[in-house]
């Protein structure tokens, strides 16, 4: 990876982003040696300007940052590193040095649903032996639709009864089976979201 380290005196800024939630976790700086160590070991290593040495995130706290991907910007003088964080990133104990915990939780939930849909769509085109998703696809649209109905009823029953904890599981089953039904009928979640967006514009 070719970077212009000399432009900023031997260092480039590295934005650290949670690969799952999309939340920006922190900003650090790397020199050539720090980048090479990061690439070789798979853990984010910075050049500490205060300590004047290489510093692997989590070397004392064990809250490391596992590298998922590294990308440079169009000017070759900054980095975007997507990671899997092992514990809080900020020294204060927060997930991010920039706060916004609640927003991150929401975005993480949305990204996970998108990832789950991707797994389901992949099972449709690349069946896997023993997969429950493929079992459902093999049963056909009618049976999948029936399962969605069953899970919807069970969710409603728990909601009316005030059984919030068990309702979580039933709602999870409902969401999953609905995604399978969408895939089985040739639709994607974005098609449903597009309808909601149009309705929102009309208000």
Image: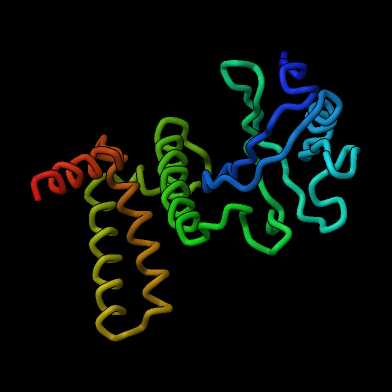
Q: How is this picture coloured?
A: rainbow
Quarter occupied by residue 31: top right
The x, y position of residue 158, in whole percent, is 31, 79
The residue positioned 42% from the left and 42% from the top of the image is 120
The x, y position of residue 2, in whole percent, is 72, 13
Q: Nearer the viewer, residue 103 or 163?
A: 103
The residue most toward the bottom is 161
The x, y position of residue 135, in whole percent, is 41, 47
The residue positioned 61% from the left and 54% from the top of the image is 96
Q: Nearer the viewer, residue 70 or 12?
A: 12
Quarter occupied by residue 67: top right
Q: Nearer the viewer, residue 32 or 152?
A: 32
Q: Is residue 102 left or right of residue 167?
A: right
Q: Is residue 194 left or right of residue 3?
A: left
Q: Count all numbered tags in the image, as a single digit.
A: 0
The residue most toward the left is 202
Q: Check the picture and name the quadrant holding the N terminus.
A: top right
The residue positioned 25% from the left and 44% from the top of the image is 193
158 in relation to 94, above or below: below
The residue positioned 72% from the left and 43% from the top of the image is 66
The x, y position of residue 139, in whole percent, is 32, 47
Q: Nearer the viewer, residue 102 or 50?
A: 50
Q: Is residue 94 left or right of residue 172?
A: right
């Amino acid at each position: 990876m070719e970077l212009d380290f000399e432009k900023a005196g031997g260092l480039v800024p590295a934005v650290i982003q949670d690969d799952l939630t999309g939340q920006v976790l922190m900003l650090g700086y790397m020199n050539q040696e720090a980048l090479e160590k990061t690439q070789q070991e798979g853990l984010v290593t910075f050049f500490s300007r205060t300590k004047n040495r290489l510093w692997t995130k989590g070397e004392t706290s064990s809250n490391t940052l596992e590298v998922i991907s590294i990308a440079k910007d169009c000017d070759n003088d900054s980095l975007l590193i997507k990671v899997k964080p092992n514990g809080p990133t900020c020294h204060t104990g927060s997930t991010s040095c920039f706060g916004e915990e609640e927003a991150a939780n929401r975005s993480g939930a949305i990204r996970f649903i998108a990832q789950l849909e991707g797994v389901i769509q992949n099972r449709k085109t690349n069946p896997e032996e023993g997969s429950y998703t493929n079992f459902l696809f093999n049963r056909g649209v009618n049976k999948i639709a029936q399962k969605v109905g069953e899970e919807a009823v069970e969710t409603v029953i728990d909601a009316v009864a005030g059984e919030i904890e068990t309702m979580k599981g039933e709602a999870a089953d409902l969401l999953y089976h609905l995604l399978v039904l969408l895939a089985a009928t040739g639709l994607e979640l974005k098609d449903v979201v597009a309808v909601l967006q149009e309705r929102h514009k009309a208000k």
